[in-house]
Structure formats: structure tokens, C-alpha cells
Image (spheres, helix red, strand yellow):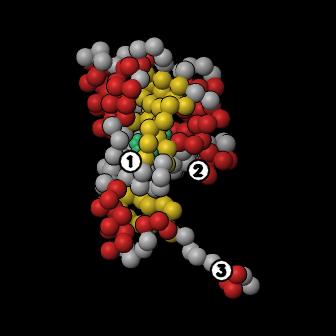
Amino acid sequence: MAIDVNDLFYAYSANDAIKEKGEYGGAVTTIMKYLLEEGIVDAVVAVEEAADLYDAKPILITDPEDVIKSAGSLHCGTLNIAKFVSKYLDGARDMKIAVTCKPCDAMTLKELMRKRKVIEENVIMIGVNCGGTMPPVPTMKMIRDVYELDPADVIKEEISKGKLKKTEWVEEKTVKDVP
Ligand SMILES: Cc1cc2nc3c(=O)[nH]c(=O)nc-3n(C[C@H](O)[C@H](O)[C@H](O)COP(=O)(O)OP(=O)(O)OC[C@H]3O[C@@H](n4cnc5c(N)ncnc54)[C@H](O)[C@@H]3O)c2cc1C
């Protein structure tokens, strides 16, 4: 099958664990893992959950088996990935990296590449669709006040055009609930 620039595909991971943990089937995580496994990049820059769902932290991964740690979308991850690359990875001067990018990260990276503060030849950007991030503290307040849920019980949320759409939460079960 011939593939052209701008062709579109539905994709999901052939790795069941990544497919399950990934946001919409784990295609992004699988591409990152492949790039690392094949030695096309030295490291992957992505994001992982830190203290809780509302706390995102950037990570640098060099072991392909660890890439799964970064699967899934952290909608409260208001991180500037471009700054992480330019400031803490010396603009990818000495290593080839693949980076997950929100549109804001991609635009910042392109600008830093133009100024040679990030080395374009050493960076593969993998874009994610993103309608906007949500600030962690107001989001927790909204979940408490509007959804009347404990933010700590929320296991997943979905956003559309920057607005919180739906939450899934842990249903507490006790021994009495077991039939
Ligand atoms: C902040 C945010 C907003 C989003 N908004 C929309 C939307 O409006 N509409 C929509 O259809 N989809 C949205 N998504 C989902 C996103 O587009 C999916 O992750 C994407 O479709 C890829 O699915 P996947 O299963 O292949 O991703 P996965 O394989 O799960 O990979 C997701 C990648 O994104 C990285 N990541 C997670 N959180 C962040 C973050 N805060 N900043 C940068 N990278 C991050 C992960 O580390 C991982 O590399 C959003 C995601 C994020 C992170």
C-alpha cells in the first residue's frame, strides 16, 4: 500500500497493555516505543502522572519497556515541553529524541529550532490533538463543587474544546456488595 503525506488512518496499538493504558488506543506510545527500540532516537520525552491525576511531570525515557509509563493523557498537564527540551536537555544538542507535543509545545519548539536553541535535526515531534489544558487546582475545585465528587476518586476525565465533559470515578465496593 502506497502511503502519501497527509494520508489519514485509524490506529491503535498491537500491544494490549499499551492499547489499554493509552488514551485512545495507544498509537502515540507505540510509535515512541518503536523509535526507541529501533535506535532511531536515544530517548523519548513524554509526560507521566506524578502525585495524582492532576499532577503531570515530564520524563526522559531510554528503556523501551518504560515507555508505557507515559501512556494516557493528563489534561491538567499545563507543562511547557519545549522549555524542558531547551533548558534541561540542552536543546537536544547531544542526543536524538522523540517528543510528544501539544500544539503549543510544537509551536514553541519550532520557534526555538528557528533560533537554534533546539537542534531540529535531533528532534522527532509526535503531535497529540489538544483542545487545551485545565489548571489543576480550579479543576479539582470544579469536580468538588459542580460534580460533587472527591477529586481523588476520579480515575479519568475527558475534555472537549478545553471544557471538561465527563468523569469516571471509582465506585466504592465493600464486602457487603459481593453477591
Ligand atoms: C492536554 C491534552 C488535551 C487533549 N485534548 C483533546 C481534545 O480536545 N480532543 C481530543 O480528541 N483529544 C484530546 N486529547 C487526547 C490526545 O489527543 C490523545 O492522547 C491522542 O489522540 C493520542 O491518543 P493515543 O491513545 O495514541 O495516546 P497515548 O498513546 O496515550 O499517548 C499520549 C501521549 O501524550 C503525552 N501526554 C499526556 N499528557 C500530556 C500533556 N499534558 N502534555 C503533553 N503530553 C502529554 C503522554 O505522555 C503520551 O506520550 C488531549 C490530550 C492532552 C494531553
Q: Does residue 20 appear to the left or right of 129 in the view shown?
A: right
Mark sitting earlier along the chain (2/1): 2
In the image, 2 versus 159, the foreground residue is: 159
Query: Label 3's element?
Result: loop
Q: Does residue 51 appear to the left or right of 79 in the view shown?
A: right
Cα gap from disc 3 to disc 2, whole angstroms: 26 Å
Q: Position of residue 15 (x, y in %)?
A: 67, 42
Q: Residue furthest front?
A: 51
Q: Which amino acid does label 1 sit on?
A: Gly
Q: Where is residue 23 in the image (x, y as percent from the top left)?
A: 51, 50
**Mark 2 sits on what residue?**
21
Vertical position of residue 55 compared to residue 64: above or below = below
Q: In which quarter of the image is residue 108?
A: top left
Classed neighbour count for the residue bearing mark 3: other residues with Cα under 10 Å, few (<14), some (14–19), many (≥20): few
Q: Residue at x 46, y 56 (%)?
A: 53
Mark sitting earlier along the chain (3/2): 2
Q: What residue type is labelled 3?
A: Thr
Q: Is mark 1 within 8 Å of ligand 1?
A: yes
Q: Position of residue 106 (x, y in %)?
A: 34, 32
Classed neighbour count for the residue bearing mark 1: other residues with Cα under 10 Å, few (<14), some (14–19), many (≥20): many
Residue 8 visible somewhere in the drawing: no
Classed neighbour count for the residue bearing mark 2: other residues with Cα under 10 Å, few (<14), some (14–19), many (≥20): some
Q: Is mark 3 within 8 Å of ligand 1?
A: no
Q: Position of residue 89 (x, y in %)?
A: 41, 23
**Mark 3 sits on what residue?**
174
Mark number displayed over residue 77 = 1
Vertical position of residue 101 compared to residue 158: above or below = above
Query: Label 1's element?
Result: loop
Residue 117 visible somewhere in the drawing: yes
